[in-house]
Image (spheres, rainbow, N blue to C red):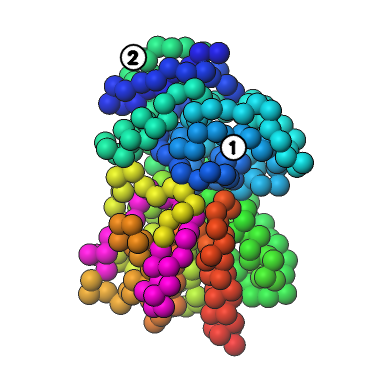
Amino acid sequence: MKAVLGLEDGTYVVGDGFGKEGVTCGELVFATPTTGYEEALTDPSYKGQILLFTYPLIGNYGVNKASFQSSGIKAEGLVIRERCDHPSHNLSTRNLSQFLDDENASGICEVDTRMLTIRIRTAGTMRAAMIVGSDDGEKACELARKWQFPKDIVNQVTCRQPYEIPGNGPRVVVMDFGVKRSIVDNLAHRGAHTIVVPATTSAEQVMGYQPDAILLSNGPGDPENATNGIAVAKKLAGQLPIFGICLGHQIASLALGASTYKLKFGHRGANQPVIDLETGKVYITSQNHGYAVDPASIDGRDIKITHVNANDGTVEGMKNDALKVWSVQYHPEANPGPQDTNWFFDSMLQRIGGHHA
């Protein structure tokens, strides 16, 4: 089946379509991991984005639901060089094409992903439109130019009702801006009594759960649009420990008075080197973000930068000990990616234990 992908700058490529027929719009972003397509496609942080994999062969180990980071595909669409229709893995239940069919999602393959990646790196993240069932590049580019990223994107991925994973440890309220399943699993596996609440939950409602700490989760979109999350973090900072991961890190920083900005093409991959400024150690991390905290906005505030990206110097972690706020930009739970920074959850529970005592 023919398909076309058009960018807002007029660039378009024609390839083979699979999955849902019709039009799909979103920001075109690229990710560099060699594995982990199941986790990435189901990561709520990719909502509103068409995901391009730079690795040339995708689908060779099939699809296994145990790897999902949410209930199903959250990325708007998939762009790959070559699709494997005959996977080999003992846990695989279907191939990539069947997966997109089942999830009513669209994909395009047999296109020059290297050229598209270089285009994004040169011009920055762009709006894009994919049409499965057509090769009309001009129409795709026109649709891309008309599309706008939704400001309420978090509301499309947050849970509708609170839910709990019982545990004998500290009570942790997770504000769900698009939380990955593996983050909740990491807390539950460590015995935390985990309470996941919608992104619209007020500070008073959060405190009604009698938490020992709050975790601001990952999620999609511009952190400045997460106004309720910022308000909750601002109101509760200093009352109990607050932790943030990815979007949650940006929300926590905004609550403390810092500002954020959009990166040219973001960090999306499983090999981002991060320097721990307190120990000098370098960790290889999994990342998925298009915004970052502006280090200049931290000057003069009681905020300490704890981690920086070894490639471009962007802020990867911060803390305010007086207000009991700690956050990281990278994904300590990985999935996909290295487990170098999984200690974050141990450190988090140790800090909660000290506060709880």
Give x and y (percent) for residue 295.
27, 64
Give x and y (percent) for residue 331.
50, 58
Could you classify mark 2 by the number of other residues whose Cα lies within 10 Å: few (under 14), some (14-19), or many (20 or more)? some
Could you classify mark 1 by the number of other residues whose Cα lies within 10 Å: few (under 14), some (14-19), or many (20 or more)? many
Q: Quadrant of the N terminus?
A: top right
First in residue order: circle 1 vs circle 2? 1
Q: Which mark is residue 138?
A: 2
**Residue 249 image-quadrant placement:** bottom left
**Residue at (57, 34) in percent of width and height:** 58
Q: Quadrant of the C terminus?
A: bottom right
- Magenta run includes residue 277: yes
**Residue at (70, 42) in percent of width and height:** 65
Between marks 1 and 2, how big is the CA–CA gap? Answer: 28 Å
Give x and y (percent) for residue 222.
37, 48
The residue type indicated by label 2 comes to Glu
Q: Is residue 138 above or below residue 221?
A: above
Give x and y (percent) for residue 106.
54, 25
Residue 158 shown left or right of residue 148 in the figure: right
**Residue at (48, 71) in percent of width and height:** 242
Q: Is residue 152 above or below residue 163?
A: above
Q: Which residues are magenta?
A: 274-298
From the image, tell me which residue sits under label 1. 73
- Magenta run includes residue 278: yes
The residue type indicated by label 1 comes to Ile
**What element does badge 1 sit on?**
loop
Name the residue nearer the viewer: 58 or 141: 58
Name the residue nearer the viewer: 316 or 201: 316
Q: How would you classify the magenta stretch by its main secondary structure?
A: strand
Residue 78 shown left or right of residue 72 in the figure: left
